[in-house]
Amino acid sequence: MENQENQHDQEKKENENGVNFLTEVVTIGFFGGFIWSIVNFVAYYLNLSKVGPALILNPWALGDWKNKVLGQLIGILVIAVLSIGVAFVYRAILAKVKSVLAGVLFGAAIWGIVFYLLKPIFPDLKPLHELGWNTIATTLCIYLLYGLFIGYSISFVYAQKYNTSNKP
């Protein structure tokens, strides 16, 4: 009977860890997208980049408002929400990796996806050779840091939750 109670307690603890971990992934994803899209907005505002957070609105929003401050702010919120899904992708694929490089490469992959694969759905996004080196360098660095933030945070929480839960 005691063995059965211990097993039930262990399963309950694992469920609590799982729920808490998922909540933390959501939080990391939201704030990662929020923070780094604000950095992108600042870079856009300072003319370090020709691409601001409002890029995410291009496939759906009509009108010139999306290129103004309101569009950039709405873009920041949309990116923050979409970033939750990105965090879950990282959690599913790379959470167990204990290397900073995994997050940086994840950020580079996201940059490649946005600027190459998804370019057809962003009509206002110019080809890379027309964007200029400032925009390329700035956006690439922001995406690398975003990937590092998401990757390191999720891997750290994963290690805290699952590597220490096996200890008595």
Image: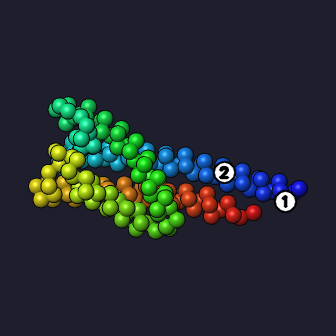
- Assign a secondary structure to mark 2: helix
Q: Quadrant of the N terminus?
A: bottom right
Q: Quadrant of the C terminus?
A: bottom right
Relative to 50, say whether 71 is above or below. above
| Residue 152 shows up from this direction | no
Q: For the residue marked with disc 1, what is the amino acid?
A: Asn
On the image, numbered disc 1 is attached to which residue? 3
Residue 26: x and y in percent read 49, 46
Q: Quadrant of residue 68?
A: top left
The residue positioned farthest toward the right in the image shown: 1
Farthest residue in the left direction? 130
| Crowd rating for badge 1 (residues with CA inside 10 Å; few <14, some 14–19, many 20+) | few
Please provide percent x and percent y for residue 47. Answer: 17, 46
Q: Residue at x 41, y 62 (%)?
A: 103
x%, y% of residue 80?
38, 43
Number of numbered tags placed on the structure image: 2
The disc, 1 or 2, on the residue closer to the chain's N-terminal end is 1
Q: Nearer the viewer, residue 125 or 53?
A: 125
Q: Is residue 26 left or right of residue 117?
A: right
**Percent position (x, y) of residue 151?**
44, 59
Mark identifier at residue 15: 2
The answer to whether residue 57 is left or right of residue 36 is: left
> For the residue marked with disc 2, what is the amino acid?
Asn
Q: CA distance from mark 1 to mark 2?
A: 18 Å
Which residue corresponds to the image point at 32% horizontal and 45% vertical from the top-left? Answer: 37
42 left or right of 127 in image = right
Is residue 40 visible from the viewing direction of this image?
yes
Residue lying at 40% horizontally and 47% vertically, measured from the top left: 83
Q: Are marks 1 and 2 in contact (CB under 8 Å)?
A: no
